[in-house]
Image: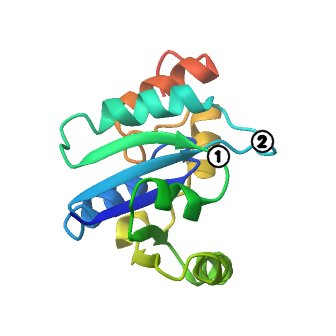
Amino acid sequence: MTIAVYPGSFDPFTFGHLDILERSTKLFDQVIVAVLVHPTKTCLFGVDKRVEIITDVLRNKPNVSVENFNGLVVDFCKQRNSCAIIRGLRAVSDYDYELQISSINKQLSPEIETIFLMSSMQYSFLSSSIAKEIAKYGGDVSALVPPRVEAELRKAYGKREL
């Protein structure tokens, strides 16, 4: 069985993330969405809430699981017998950062491959930060995030409707 890890902070989980995930499930038998616990990053949602939301969004995907982790993603991959790390790329600007990270990961664990998937065109502009910014000011995020995420953003920003 081939297992891949799709790591990220996912704060919040967007349709862009879902697009990359759904496409990666066609390449691997199992994909683990690894929600990062990042001690220096301030997130809108705590890690347990992010795991809960993403698990709910992905409840009908039998070959996907959701876990949290801290530390090095390559160590998490080894613990889960994963052969690959999935990373989404929206634009050339993402590539520079991702190239650095994948090169270090390859040095740390040569047996683990990094697989880059380009975002679908309709999500090439989308980031969690943009979704949060729009939601914060009461904008409509229904085309950016799944309904469960939209509801959680409304709660977080005290809005009845976005």
Residue 32 coordinates in the image, percent (x, y):
37, 51
| SS assignment at label 2 | loop
Q: Find disc 2 in the rendering and name its residue.
A: 39
Neighbours of disc 2 within 10 Å: few (<14), some (14-19), many (20+) = few
Between tags 2 and 1, which lies in front? 1
| SS assignment at label 1 | loop
Q: CA distance from mark 2 to mark 1?
A: 9 Å
Q: Is residue 34 left or right of residue 98?
A: left
Foreground pick, 72 / 63: 72
Residue 57 coordinates in the image, percent (x, y):
32, 35
Q: Is residue 115 left or right of residue 94?
A: left
Q: Verify CB contact (< 8 Å) between mark 2 and mark 1.
A: yes
Q: Which mark is residue 70?
A: 1
- First in sequence: mark 2 or mark 1? 2
Q: Is residue 109 left or right of residue 16?
A: right
Is 97 rendered above or below residue 49? below
Residue type at numbered disc 2: Pro
On the rendered image, what quadrant is the N terminus found in? bottom left
Residue at x 43% of width, y 68% of height: 86
- Res 46 quadrant in image: top right
Residue at x 46% of width, y 44% of height: 13
Residue type at numbered disc 1: Asn
Residue at x 46% of width, y 80% of height: 111
Residue at x 48% of width, y 54% of height: 79
